[in-house]
Amino acid sequence: MKYALYLILLLAVASCTTSSPISQTAPRYQTYNQYDQEPITASLFEDETATISEENIQKILDGDYALPKELRVALVKLEGTQSQTRYYWNDETYLKSQQAYLDSFTSQFKQSDRVQRISKIPDLLLSDKKTFTNIREAAVRTQSDIVVVYTIYSDLYAKYKLFAKSDIKAFATTQLMILDVRTGLIPFTTVVTREYQSKRKESELSNEEAANRIKKEAILLTIQEIGKRVNDFLETA
């Protein structure tokens, strides 16, 4: 009887005890999302030397652009320090080489059906210190739609300059850009480097004469490659 009363009392206590369930909800933390900020769509830098206003920069980058279907092309060569220090206007080799490069560029551009005319802007129309503004204004006077501006550098590789071997190896780098005369935009640029290796010919009087020929061949290779790239561009532009 004593044990029965003890069991009844124990059950009564257990039935009055309540348990609280464990919360499964994780604590909340306030997080910072960096993408909630508004995107930057204009320059936040102040530049007093800028030649294009911030408003026009936005118009240029957001606007649609296309070259005219028919193109009148003007060619301009920028002389580097190499030409200024090594050649003179009475240098026959230099003059013939420049004409060969001009003829090669002309031949490459004529392969495009869009090109209607090709001419070289005379030096008389350009200032001694050529600028984009000066070149563009000269192109306007010649009624050109685009200006092809290029510069050429060539030299022998270092270990071939002493002509210790019978072979002479040269490299050439040609940079080119197309300037749209109407808009002032530059829709195409490219840089091509090529090399050419050959031996001195029996008809050549000196190693220098051979070196000039080999450098010229390297330059012509760059012009050929640039011509292909330009024509590919004109097919889709």
Image (tube, rainbow, N blue to C red):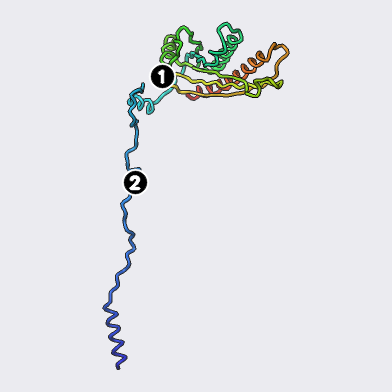
**Of circles 2 and 1, which is in front?**
2
Mark 2 or 1 closer to N-term?
Answer: 2
Residue type pointed to by label 1: Gly
Relative to the observer, which residue lies in front, 109 or 157?
157
Q: Position of residue 100 (x, y in %)?
A: 59, 12
Taking depth in this image into account, of 208 and 108 the one nearest to the observer is 208
Residue 127 badge: none
Q: Residue at x 49, y 25 (%)?
A: 236
**At x 56% / y 19%, what residue is drawn?**
153
Q: Which residue is mark 1?
A: 184
Mark 2 crowd level (few <14, some 14–19, many ≥20, 10 Å Cα): few
Question: Where is residue 223 drawn, in percent x and y?
Answer: 57, 19
Asked if 85 appears above or below 25 in the picture, the reply is above
The image quadrant that residue 183 belongs to is top left
What SS does tag 1 mark?
Answer: loop
Residue on which disc 2 sits: 33
For residue 10, side relative to residue 220 (left or right): left
**Residue sitting at 56 percent across and 8 percent down?**
88
Residue situated furthest left in the rendering: 16
